[in-house]
Image (cartoon, rainbow, N blue to C red):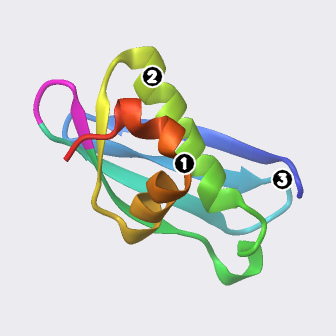
Amino acid sequence: MAQLVIVREQKPEGGRYAGRIAGSAGEAELTYLRAGAGRVIADHTYTPPAMRGNGYAGALVERLVSDARSEGFRIVPRCPFVAAQFDLHPEWADVKSG
């Protein structure tokens, strides 16, 4: 797997994680909305076809989980991919909400 660089972009209403590969035109993304104090709703992930099958979307979810633990928020997994990742990783239950 090529080196994925994950950048977090934040706005008052939510934000996104963008995963980029040096020299690649596309980027994977995971978007979220803020849902009151201490919760975010992970609502969408996308990986361009050329980047699929390399674990990049999963890496974005891992970064979201890591940030949730370090910053003390919980995640509502509304995106089907994020929900599936939570099913595969029961050790993430501490940051799952709803």
Name the front one of labels 3 and 1.
1
Q: Which residues are magenta?
A: 36-40
88 or 6: nearer the eye? 88
- Looking at the rendered structure, the secondary structure element under dot 1 is loop
Q: Is residue 64 visible?
A: no
Residue 22 is labelled as 3
Q: Secondary structure at mark 2?
A: helix
Q: CA distance from mark 3 to mark 1?
A: 29 Å
Picture residue at 47% right of the left edge, 38% below the top = 92
Q: Position of residue 57 (x, y in %)?
A: 60, 60
The image shows residue 88 at horizontal and vertical percentages of 55, 57
| Mark whose residue sits in front, 2 or 3 | 2
Please tell me which residue is depicted at 19% across the width and 47% down the height of the picture. 98
Residue for badge 2: 69
Kind of residue at badge 2: Arg
Name the side, left or right, on which 10 lies relative to 34.
right
Identity of the residue drawn at 47% across and 16% down: 70
| Left or right placement of residue 26 versus residue 87 in this view | right
Q: Which mark is residue 89?
A: 1
Q: Residues within 10 Å of mark 3 (few under 14, many from 20)?
A: few
Magenta-drawn stretch, dominant element (helix, strand or loop): loop
Query: Mark 2 and mark 3: span between their CA atoms?
Result: 28 Å
Of mark 2 and mark 1, the one earlier in the sequence is 2
Closer to us: mark 2 or mark 1? 1
